[in-house]
Amino acid sequence: MQLSRNRVEALTDGVFAVAMTLLVLDIKVPELQPPLDISQLSGRLLDLWPKFLSYMISFVILGVYWVGHHFQLSFIRKVDRPLVWINLLFLLWVVLVPFSTALLSEYPMTQIAITVYGLNLIAIGVTLAGHWWYATVETRHVDADIHPALVRGALLRTLMAPSVYVVAIAVSFVRPELSLFLYALVPVLYILPGRIDVHWGRRRQSN
């Protein structure tokens, strides 16, 4: 049964917009009792740095996954029921990011918080990889002339982030601060253009 790709894309965009907006709600304006003390306010604002850091990392990571999903849909020509449900599973993990981010921002050096956050991101990445694999295996939902190197490269690039997150979780048992660095590093790896982006650019020009 063939379904509308446009509705899948619209739902995904809406869910990402809500999830990315909810991230900032964890950052609360400090409440001070009068008389107002500027130095006290400055200190309270500085105390919020874990929340700001977690917010920025998660926002950019969600942005990376949104771009990745958009990239996949630019090659997917049709969708069926299994692909729709894989996409919904992907969105299920996306919606959990505000919770795992709030947990990490509240307990940034706690191993369990780092693990929960990492597992959430791993679930997103693995599901997105499964989304691409299902759509491209035997060119099920993509053009028959799609280059095998593009299919393989996109899959490996999608799985790169979950691999780093596994390492970050393992490292958190001994160096929690290094785990946070790895989480922050992943978006940089995807923001930098790669060979996949060249294929994507050519595809968009041809359309």
Image (cartoon, helix red, strand yellow):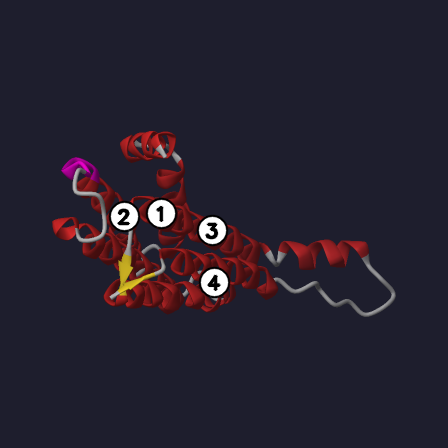
The answer to whether residue 138 is magenta is no
Query: Which residue corresponds to the image point at 22% horizontal and 52% vertical from the top-left?
Result: 141
The answer to whether residue 147 is magenta is yes
How crowded is the residue under tag 1: few (<14 C-alpha within 10 Å), some, or many (20+)?
many
Disc 1 residue type (three-letter)? Gly
Residue beneath disc 1: 68
Query: Which residue corresponds to the image point at 42% horizontal and 60% vertical from the top-left?
Result: 7
Of helix, strand and loop, which one carries label 2? helix
Task: Please identify the quadrant where the N terminus is shown.
Answer: bottom left
Residue beneath disc 2: 158
Using the image as rendered, state which of residue 174 and residue 118 is in the foreground: 118
- Asked if the residue at tag 1 contacts the one at tag 2, i.e. Cβ–Cβ closer than 8 Å, the answer is yes
Farthest residue in the right direction? 35
Disc 3 residue type (three-letter)? Ile
> What is the distance, in whole Å, between disc 1 and disc 3 at their CAs?
17 Å
How crowded is the residue under tag 4: few (<14 C-alpha within 10 Å), some, or many (20+)?
some
Highlighted magenta segment, given as a residue range: 146-150
Using the image as rendered, state which of residue 122 and residue 14 is in the foreground: 14
Of helix, strand and loop, which one carries label 3? helix
Between disc 2 and disc 4, whose residue precedes? 4
Residue 15 circle label: 4
- The picture places residue 169, in percent across and down from the top left corner, at 29, 59
**Magenta part, dominant SS:** helix
Residue 25, by quadrant, is: bottom right
> What is the distance, in whole Å, between disc 3 and disc 2 at their CAs?
18 Å
* Dot in front, 2 or 1: 1
Disc 4 residue type (three-letter)? Val
